[in-house]
Amino acid sequence: MPIRTAVPPRVLTVAGSDSGGGAGIQADLKTMLALGVHGMSVLTAVTAQNSLGVQGAWELPVDAVRAQYRSVVDDIGVQAVKTGMLASAALVETVAELLAGTDAPVVVDPVGVSKHGDALLAAEALDSVRTKLLPVATVATPNLDEVAQLTGVQVTDEDGMRRAAEEILAFGPRWALIKGGHLPGDAVDLLTDGSAEHWLRAPRYDNRHTHGTGCTLASAIASGLALGQDVPTAVEGAKAYVTGAIQAGFALGGGIGPVDHGWRTRLAE
């Protein structure tokens, strides 16, 4: 077997932990490995979580988050950053400040609730997401529930996705990816920078084991950006990867199982 000599692109996830391994930094790092980049992490919160839901969540101190970030970025460096669960206004503002001083594309997954409906962001932190975090994002990736939280727009069709994208872009990200997976029919997402529109469609698989889809998609986009892809190419590749992971999702425990981050490896066996 040949020995690797080149250093792979480095991607940093700033997110919470999922003790069940399906979402959060666990999903992020699995995705990054599957897509050929070196994943690193800044832990913002610890959750007690399984296939049935979130039983508890504890955010880390601001100083601990800042120290992790500086430790990684100042020594190792990054080619892309992805954010997930940030829990509180103080953490959102701290992370936004750190990102503003980092020369790398940023994918913001504005995590508000878990797949099971458990709150993962304090209500008072929403304004900090709007005014501090989204302005530093290269790509923001809200689902329809998060769109409603951030903008008040209730999306029921594809025209509504356009309105949602306009509202999200008004907060300052360069691109908005509105995830329409909660709509009926094919799984459709809209990527736009306010001028060009890219509609991404994929078949909807009859599989309820979809825990971690949002984390996985954002991490896959960040991986593509770190590999030098432009935003539309990175998002298109991420969509294809997540679609395969959903199709291969499997049961764990008594509730909603995870997507399969290693589906391409297993397919090749």
Image (tube, helix red, strand yellow):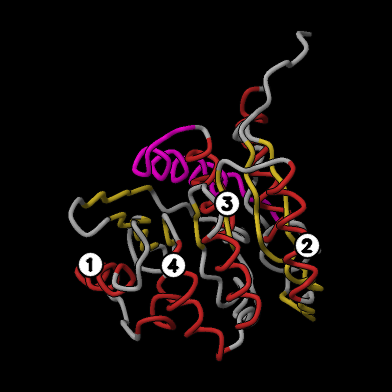
Residue holding disc 4: 142
Q: What residue type is labelled 3?
A: Val
Label 1 belongs to which residue?
162
Alpha-carbon distance for marks 3 and 1? 26 Å
Label 4–label 2 contact, CB within 8 A: no
Q: Which disc is residue 81 wearing?
A: 3
Earlier residue among tags 3 and 1: 3
Which one is in front in this view, the residue at disc 3 or the one at disc 2? 2
* Amino acid at the residue labelled 1: Arg
Mark 3 touches mark 2? (CB < 8 Å): no
Q: Residue 156: x percent and y percent?
A: 28, 76
Residue type, numbered disc 4: Pro
On the rendered structure, is 54 left or right of 35? right
Magenta region includes residue 1: no
Where 12 sits versus 185, above or below?
A: above
Q: Name the residue under label 2.
A: 67
- Mark 3–mark 2 Cα distance, whole angstroms, equals 16 Å
